[in-house]
Structure formats: C-alpha cells, structure tokens
Amino acid sequence: MRLGNRSRGDGDNWDFNNLDDSQRPWVDVLERELHPLWDLGRNLLLVWTPGEMSLEVLVIPHYTISEHAIRSGEEASRMEKSALGLHPTSFLEDVIANPKHVTPDGLKYLAKQMECDITKIQLPFQPGRDLPYSAIETVIKRYSIAYIDDRAVALFDIVGFSLLSPLEQVTQLNSLSYSINSAYSKMLDNNIEINFARTTTGDGFYIWNRDRSGHANVNLYHFMHLVLADNAIARNKASGRTTPLLRTCFHIGGHYEFYQSEGLSPTVFSFIVGDVTIELARMIDRALPGQVLVGSFLARMPDRMTGTMTPTNTLQFIERTQDTLSSLKGLVLSGDHIDQIQCYLTGAKRNGEFAVQNFLIADKHGRTRNVYNAKINIYRSGSEPIFLGLQASELKDFKIESTDFD
C-alpha cells in the first residue's frame, strides 16, 4: 500500500490557463466546497482521494500536526513506513512532503494515525474526468501545508536599508524587483526552466524555484547570477541612492510551504519557513556588502550517468553548475552578449594545487555553520566584464570563528 500516486516532494503547480471553458466552473465549485472546511485558516486539508462524484478529504486543526509530533515522537516504525513507500525520517514530514493526492487505503491509514474522521464532499462533476487530478491537487495545496527537504533558496539583502528614507527604500526595493523580473525574462528567452517565487524579508527577498526537476536548484543558482549582474549594471549607471548595494546568500535545505490568509481566503502565493530560511538569515548577518555566501549543504541531484538521485555536497554542486553555464552563453545584458561566465568558490593554492576555503561563522546566539565565499565573473562582448562577489583578499572584515580548506 502506498500513500501517494506521484513522486515524493512533487512541488509542481497546475497552470490553470490550461483549463478549457468547461472545466473552469468546476474549480469555483471545488473552492466553495473547500472554503468552509478550511474555516478561515483554523484547519488544514492534509490529504485527499477521489470518488465517483466526490472527494474524500482529511481535515485537521492546524495545531494537530505539532501535537501529533510531540505525542508520537515524530517517528513511525520503519516497517510501517517501508510498506507505505515512505523514507525512514519524520513521519509527519513524510506525509506533508508527499502529494496530497493519496490512495483510499492511504487516506484510511492516515485517518487512523491522526485519530480523525474522513470528510466526504459531494460534487456535481467527476474528479479526473471533468477536472484533472493535478488541478484538484493545486487547489487543495492552498488549504494545506507542504514540506520540501532539499530546495535551493537565494536571499538578496539590501545593505543599509534601515538607514534610508522611506522613498529611497521603496525605490531600492523596486530596483531589486526589476532586476529579478529582468533575470527571469532573460532565462525564459533562453528556454531555461525557472518558475520562481519570492517573499519579502522587509529589506530584500527570498527567492526559490517552484519547479522540482533535477536541475531546478542549479537553475536558481544561475538565476541568482543574472539578478546580481543586472543590479551591478544598474548601479554603475545610477545616480544617487536609487539602486541597492546587495549582499547575497545561497543555500539548499528543508522548509515548510504554506499559504497565508488574505481577507477570508488563502492567497495564491506561497510562503516558506524552515531550516533553509533560518540558515540564510544567520548567514546574511555575517555577509559583507557585495559578498556572495554559499552554505554548506548536502542535496539530492541526478547522477550524470545513471540519472538516479545521489547526495551532492556544496563543492560538487558548484562543479555541476559548470555543466550548464553554456546555456547562459549568448544572453544579452545591457545590450551586450555574454561570452563566458565563471562561477567558483574562493580559496588559495596549497601544495601547488588550488583548495577551496570554508569558513566557520557564528551568529548572535553562538550557533555556528560553515559557509563558502563565492565569485562570479561575467565576460561580455564589447563591454567590461562584471565581477560579482568579493575576492579572498577583500575578506579582512569578514567575522569568522575559524577557517579550513576542502
């Protein structure tokens, strides 16, 4: 017996522009049925399964998740989880990391585990035939919560934002927002898949890729390059304090994704919170103006030869980004074509060979983490190259606890 019908951590959202005119009314009907169950955000729709002219859903109060985690110790037996096709990690994280669409047996099993009743919704249409399962899944996600265990997130932070006047703050946020939109447009023009999402931090943005393909995290890293490049070009042309000076961090880790209430309904835009955003916030506190930091992580990526998902550390990830840099060749930045891009982690020569340097930094709570200093060099035809990030020689003010070489 398996809970889900698709791959674990599937984060793709259905594009409702693909619906035809006969299907659109059923989305509205489904929304009207789900809204009372959601109860203004008091409840979550944990999972669902289709019937002939109905849906069966598991509706739980949002606080039930944390209560169940405490009560069960966040662990189901390995034998049970293996039978369900789940990974032997946190039981609840596995449930919300998997698709909301489950089998009937999976729904009954979870209802028993969560000690709650199954709610049946009668519908005037047949799920799957009149409205695609993927469209139903996307609607239900807005009333639920998801967990993604290895997604890349970039954090752009405006240096000295709190010291600016309100008008300057708005101007600089708009400038950064334009650089993000411009980079997105350029990647689409080159047929590079990125379905980016963002949420504001007040003085910057978290950016992530909704796409969950094997190359989604690499594409976000390149997306970050183009945002920084557009910002650098704008800064060279700007007068006054209209364009922000940025410090930037990139990390891969787990997070929860949810939809906040807007008025009396959930928003169509998601928010993220979790280990990856916490790590980024602590990294950005130590980053210098103009610096690009990359966290120390272990992420799953497809093997070049077999295509199977394999653990990949930070150094291997940066090495993998070299394979796709050619896809950015020919992109136009400020009227000039990109001839070459180099992205690397800084270090020094040791015993005649180049070694990447890692830094141990501490936050205000004394918690430590390892980070890397990144450099990106963009060479354009007809213009001066764009150098992003700081060189190793510019890190004298970088507050670290210790350093080592990989």
Image (spheres, rainbow, N blue to C red):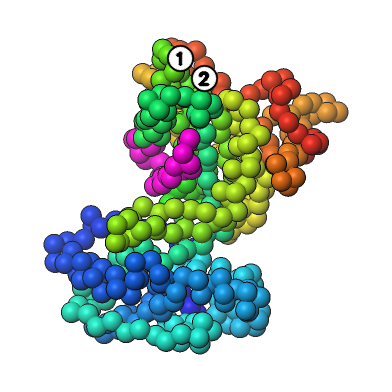
For label 2, the SS is strand
Is 106 colored magenta in this rendering?
no
For label 1, the SS is helix
Left or right position of 167 against 246 = left
Q: In terms of depth relative to the viewer, which is nearer, 380 or 264?
A: 264
Question: Is residue 133 in sight in this rendering?
Answer: no
Write down the residue under mark 1.
236
Where is residue 58, by image quadrant? bottom left
Which residue lies at the image location 60% right of the left edge and 31% below the top edge? 292
Which residue lies at the image location 58% right of the left edge and 25% below the top edge? 290
Q: In terms of depth relative to the viewer, which is nearer, 343 or 66?
A: 66
Which residue lies at the image location 63% right of the left edge and 57% below the top edge? 310
Indicate the position of residue 239 as horizontal and vertical percent values: 41, 12
Report the magenta residues as a range. Answer: 182-207
Quadrant position of the C terminus in the picture: top right
Write down the residue under mark 2.
386
Indicate the position of residue 298 as horizontal and vertical percent values: 66, 52
| Residue 147 badge | none
Is 189 colored magenta in this rendering?
yes
